[in-house]
Image (cartoon, grey):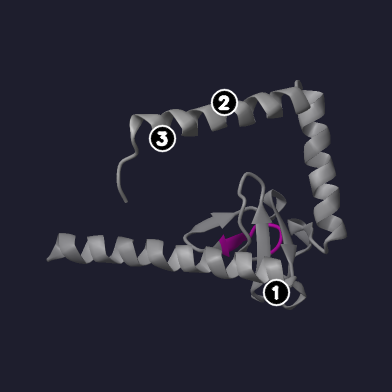
Amino acid sequence: MGFVTEEQAAAIFAAIDRRDAEREAEMPDTRAALYHASVGQDRLMKLGWADGIYCPKDGTRFALVQWGSTGVHAGFYMGNWPDGHIYCGDFLVQPQAVMWKAIDKLSPDETAMLAASEADDRAFMNRQLAAFAEEIG
């Protein structure tokens, strides 16, 4: 990874400013932002995603999307309902914070997104393990 020139940095920040202005025009207030979130949730449900509270509770691995993330990840429920959590990668999350879908029901695009997320997770864990190994010598 290298550095960017001053002109490249200015172009990046100008693009961010344009994107922010478009979002502000599209969603000027909380009501508009909540509407867009609701529309997104409705569309995800039409694409086969369900509220996380309905995920399998038997250790079955499933795909999940978490509010605030742009990836498709894999996880499984651990513990006894309603006190358990979904284990995903290197963190635990409450079922209420995700939507889930059976892995065998993913579209080709969703499957590719899941594979990319899992590759990123593996690379992250490998970097963590390498740093730990270096630290302990």
Is residue 74 visible in this depiction of the protein? no
The structure residue drawn at horizontal position 83% and vertical position 41%, both measured from the top left corner, is 38
Query: Is tag 1's residue or tag 2's residue first in the polypeptide sequence?
Result: 2
Q: Secondary structure at mark 3?
A: helix
How far apart in space, not on screen, are marks 1 and 2 (Cα)?
Answer: 37 Å
Quadrant in which residue 17 is drawn? top right
The segment highlighted magenta reads 81-87
Question: Residue 86 in magenta?
Answer: yes
- Of residue 113 and residue 132, the one placed in the foreground of this image is 113
Badge 2, how many Cα within 10 Å: few under 14, some, many 20+? few
Query: Is tag 2's residue or tag 3's residue first in the polypeptide sequence?
Result: 3
Q: Which residue is mark 3?
A: 8
Instruction: Determine which of the numbered discs, if any, sits on residue 17 in the image.
Output: 2
Quadrant (top left, top right, bottom left, bottom right) of the C terminus: bottom left
Give residue 50's position: percent from left, percent from top.
Answer: 80, 60
Amino acid identity at mark 1? Ile
Q: Secondary structure at mark 1?
A: helix
Amino acid identity at mark 2? Asp
Q: Secondary structure at mark 2?
A: helix
Circles 1 and 2, Cβ within 8 Å, touching? The answer is no
Circles 2 and 3, Cβ within 8 Å, touching? The answer is no
Quadrant in which residue 115 is drawn? bottom right
Q: Which residue is mark 1?
A: 103
How far apart in space, not on screen, are marks 3 and 1 (Cα)?
Answer: 40 Å
Quadrant in which residue 109 is drawn? bottom right
Query: Is tag 3's residue or tag 1's residue first in the polypeptide sequence?
Result: 3
